[in-house]
Amino acid sequence: MIRLPGTKKYCVLTGNYGSGKTEIALNLATQLSPAEKTTLVDLDIVNPYFRSGEKKEEMERAGIRMLMPVFALTTVDIPALPAEIQSVFEVPADRVIFDVGGDDTGAAALGRYYPSFSANRENTLMVLVLNGMRPLTRDPEDVCDLAERISSRGRMAFDMIINNTNLADQTTPEMLMEGEHLAEICAERLGIADICNTGMPEVLSACELHHPAYPIRRKMVPEWMGDL
């Protein structure tokens, strides 16, 4: 099970396209429920594909409250953020997970809720999900630039980096270990204290890592890949 630091109520997961933040959000929500009353907020206003809102029915069957932008799964270009999302700061819940678009445009959605996050900052964990195999996050300069742009637009500094370096079914232990080294460099430059790793169990079991590692299962595999 993914064990994030402490028992903070709000967990904000953001990262570049292909980082795996949605997989982690779905895994975390599933693991927390039903022991804890959990809400998953799909706040990705950028990426129309592979979003947590696609799993709304599955999440709700697992007892997870699911919220998403209006028109999030349609052809409308700019989804609207419903007033109901604000309710997560007002309605009792044990944990609330935010799956946020992974660039400064996507982080603008966080800025809209800045007063609420600011009032709950000590109870909020801001997480950068890193996949060192993606084109725009392969070196420290690009990762730090992305993190700083997201922080500036969302008006929240990062508390943690999750190294989720992978290349789907072609992932090797060496990739994940190199990703951890990249995460360490970026964490030092950005002043981030906490790092952990996530990945498929068979990959993690073959790694020698310096930070905690938690297995996740792929939940966003397209139907056409199901028999591959």
Image (spheres, rainbow, N blue to C red):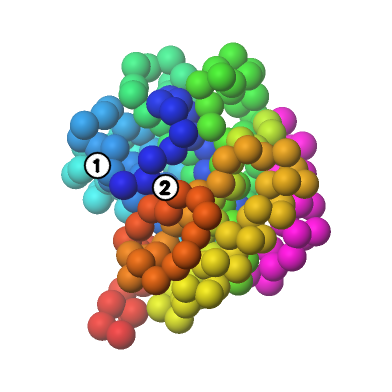
Query: Circle 1 is placed at which residue position?
Result: 60
Amino acid type at mark 1:
Glu
| 89 lies above or below 68 | above
Sooner in the amino-acid sequence: mark 1 or mark 2:
2
Q: In 3D space, how far apart are the residues under numbered discs 1 and 2 (Cα atoms)?
A: 14 Å
**Which span is picked out in magenta?**
134-155
Which residue is more in the foreground, 27 or 224? 27
- Which residue occupies 34% across, 50% down? 27
Instruction: Find residue 25 and name its label.
Output: 2
- Which residue occupies 76% across, 51% down? 144
| 100 lies above or below 173 | above
Identify the element where label 2 is drawn: helix
Residue 119: % across, % down: 59, 14
The quarter holding residue 115 reads top right
| 200 lies above or below 129 | below
Q: Is residue 64 left or right of 172 when viewed as pictured?
A: left
Q: Is residue 18 left or right of 147 when viewed as pictured?
A: left
In which quadrant of the rendered image does the C terminus lie? bottom left
| 120 lies above or below 24 | above
